[in-house]
Image: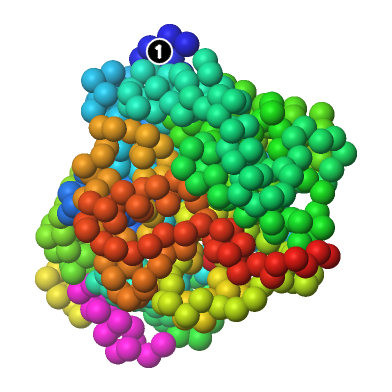
């Protein structure tokens, strides 16, 4: 199989298969969660907090200053990585082209050198997170194989994308194929690792806010 | 109730719900909850990381409630939870968690870890891994009707004492009044002046009220140990008495878990809403203040700080009320660092103070509160939970601190304008 054939496979059947697994996997995980149900709370709620669940989806992204003081590095690395990842994914011209092809519409992109720099920062933050995970006593204590697997699954698309953009390490066509394959790997495993938080974070934050809001202790 | 490992695991299955599944799914092992937990910050031991305290429950969830986990179990790739493991986790679930809820407000993915620890305790108790002290309190509740073994006679003696002290008659079993007053065990035993304070405040405000000979105690050890059957029985005692007397409100006392038990868990435990409303004493006092029915004179000048009881403030939503009331009677009120919703626990909530095994750990983590108090330079610390107060007093003594303590209701009553009736 030539580099071009691999690229064509990755962009065609490979991508379709990966997206199918991703969609089915995510649906399964959501069913696994929601099918467990939740007992109705019979205690009278404090008035005026009906939207606390929805609000918490947003507000929980803002670290409180009391917590920020002791845990700033986790927040800084986490924020840097996540913002960098989303900028790279959503504001890089070739990515938008792909989305336009699938969705039928696109949006303005950032200049490539800017995205390039952001991607590099995001990669650096991800390495920082790994180092912190290995160094910090609590993080190290909690770390499982799954954490490292999730780290690798996330790192590969960023790294291979960066290498492909700069024509480094492998011939461009091959590196581009490897980049797309790494994204497919990420899609396939996302529902079955902690990376499922891309979807479940909205559910858990909603429940958290709803339960606190019920008691009037809204944050 | 005979405890067994099977019963414990079955309890784990019974409590498993969509919120818990979403929480376990979302955890990214970031470890931020450790920084929110005083058992970690004061010991530096990673095993006290809140989410880790749930590990057996999480493993069961993964093995039985996720497809991948089921496949892994079939292939023999995951090891089932064992009784020995649950025994090991008893310390983490009971001794090093006060259900204070600080991790719940800190978790960036929104995991209500406190909710899960409370649920996990159901299984731990059913498996026979609840600590001796809390089992003892629960046994006394079943046999004698009170976690501290308080008999009606003892309660009535305190009522009489307060009547003599204040010169005000305290109505007993009076039907048709608006308010039923109940007390925490700790108040009945150690701080009966709470009742006298209420008598004086209610007289001034012109409220009709009563105490009950059938339900005078609000403390609910069933909630703390995690046995819903017993928790239900204790709540029902109050509900039956209140509905028999036909009161409009039951006043939850200065006790954190009593409020949680009666206000939030109660209707769910008995499976129906009440025919009365539960109001926390601080909510009521603040209502009276706003209505101009609570009249005080003078303000204390000495520097004064507030310890926020977790179950009343963070997990109860009563945040502004204690501050309004303190400012009414104190000119130099100083907030602690990390106050209100982010306050640190006294270290003895959630049954920890009844758990003798946890005593040394409780004094170790008190160092956090010690620093908070010292940071304010206050001479007096006010609180609104008799259990907090007792735990704090023990901590102050252990660390040779001379901070004075007073209950908020009592503080307000000290400044009450005498001989004025609404």
Residue drawn at (32%, 54%) of the image: B37
Q: Is residue B353 above or below residue B292?
A: above
Q: Is residue B292 above or below residue B10?
A: below
Residue drawn at (47%, 63%) of the image: B382
The chain carrying label 1 is: B
The answer to whether residue A115 is magenta is: yes
Badge 1 local density, few (<14 within 10 Å), some, or many (20+)?
A: some
- Label 1's element? loop
Residue drawn at (32%, 88%) of the image: A114
In x, y percent, where is residue A130? 18, 61
Magenta residues span: A110-125
In the image, A179 versus B42, the foreground residue is: B42
Q: Residue furthest right?
A: B176
In x, y percent, where is residue A137? 15, 55
Quadrant of the drawing holding the C terminus of chain A: bottom right
Asked if residue B206 lies left or right of residue B76, the reply is: right
The answer to whether residue B402 is magenta is: no
In the image, B368 versus B378, the foreground residue is: B378
Which residue is denoted by mark 1 in the rendering? B3
Can residue B22 be seen by looking at this rendering? no
Q: Is residue B286 above or below residue A203?
A: below
In x, y percent, where is residue A48? 72, 63
Residue drawn at (76%, 56%) of the image: B203
In x, y percent, where is residue A68? 33, 72
Residue B81 lies in quadrant: top left
Asked if residue A140 lies left or right of residue B114, the reply is: left
């Amino acid at each position: 199989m030539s580099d071009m054939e691999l690229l064509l496979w990755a962009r065609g059947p490979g991508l379709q298969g990966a997206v199918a697994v991703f969609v089915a996997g995510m649906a399964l995980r959501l069913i696994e969660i929601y099918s467990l149900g939740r007992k109705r709370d019979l205690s009278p709620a404090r008035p005026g907090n009906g939207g606390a669940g929805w609000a918490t989806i947003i507000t929980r992204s803002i670290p409180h200053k009391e917590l920020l003081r002791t845990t700033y590095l986790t927040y800084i690395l986490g924020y840097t990585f996540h913002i960098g990842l989303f900028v790279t994914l959503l504001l890089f011209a070739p990515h938008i082209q792909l989305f336009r092809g699938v969705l039928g519409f696109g949006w303005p992109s950032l200049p490539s050198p800017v995205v390039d720099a952001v991607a590099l920062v995001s990669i650096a933050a991800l390495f920082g997170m790994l180092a912190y995970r290995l160094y910090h006593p609590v993080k190290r204590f909690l770390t499982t194989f799954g954490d490292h697997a999730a780290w690798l699954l996330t790192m590969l698309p960023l790294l291979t994308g960066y290498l492909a953009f700069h024509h480094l390490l492998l011939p461009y066509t091959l590196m581009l194929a490897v980049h797309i394959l790494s994204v497919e790997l990420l899609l396939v495993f996302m529902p079955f690792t902690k990376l499922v938080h891309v979807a479940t974070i909205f559910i858990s934050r909603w429940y958290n806010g709803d339960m606190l809001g019920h008691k009037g202790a809204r944050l | 109730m005979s405890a067994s490992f099977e019963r414990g695991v079955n309890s784990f299955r019974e409590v498993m719900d969509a919120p818990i599944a979403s929480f376990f799914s979302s955890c990214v092992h970031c470890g931020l909850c450790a920084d929110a937990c005083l058992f970690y910050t004061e010991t530096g031991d990673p095993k006290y990381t809140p989410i880790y305290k749930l590990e057996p429950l999480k493993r069961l969830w993964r093995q039985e409630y996720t497809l991948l986990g089921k496949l892994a179990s079939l292939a023999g790739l995951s090891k089932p939870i064992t009784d020995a493991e649950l025994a090991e986790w008893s310390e983490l679930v009971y001794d090093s968690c006060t259900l204070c809820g600080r991790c719940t407000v800190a978790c960036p993915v929104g995991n209500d870890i406190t909710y899960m620890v409370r649920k996990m305790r159901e299984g731990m108790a059913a498996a026979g891994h609840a600590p001796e002290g809390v089992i003892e309190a629960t046994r006394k509740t079943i046999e004698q009707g009170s976690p501290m073994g308080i008999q009606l006679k003892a309660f009535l003696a305190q009522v009489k004492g307060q009547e003599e002290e204040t010169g005000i008659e305290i109505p007993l079993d009076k039907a048709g009044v608006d308010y039923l007053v109940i007390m925490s065990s700790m108040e009945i035993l150690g701080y009966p002046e709470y009742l006298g304070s209420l008598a004086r405040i209610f007289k001034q405000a012109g409220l009709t009220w009563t105490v009950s000979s059938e339900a005078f105690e609000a403390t609910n050890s069933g909630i703390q140990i995690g046995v819903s059957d017993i928790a239900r029985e204790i709540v029902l005692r109050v509900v039956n008495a209140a509905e028999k007397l036909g009161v409009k409100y039951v006043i939850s006392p200065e006790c954190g878990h009593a409020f949680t038990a009666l206000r939030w868990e109660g209707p769910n435990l008995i499976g129906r809403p009440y025919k009365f409303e539960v109001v926390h004493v601080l909510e009521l006092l603040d209502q009276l203040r706003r209505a101009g029915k609570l009249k005080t004179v003078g303000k204390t000048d000495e520097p004064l700080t507030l310890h926020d009881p977790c179950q009343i403030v963070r997990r109860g939503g009563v945040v502004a009320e204690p501050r309004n009331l303190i400012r009414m009677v104190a000119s130099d009120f100083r907030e602690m660092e990390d106050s209100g919703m982010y306050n640190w626990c006294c270290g003895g909530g959630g049954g920890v103070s009844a758990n003798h095994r946890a005593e040394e750990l409780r004094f170790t983590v008190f160092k956090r509160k010690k620093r908070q108090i010292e940071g304010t330079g206050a001479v007096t610390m006010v609180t609104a939970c008799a259990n907090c107060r007792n735990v704090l007093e023990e901590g102050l003594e252990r660390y040779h601190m001379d901070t004075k303590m007073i209950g908020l209701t009592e503080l307000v009553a000290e400044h009450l304008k005498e001989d004025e009736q609404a």
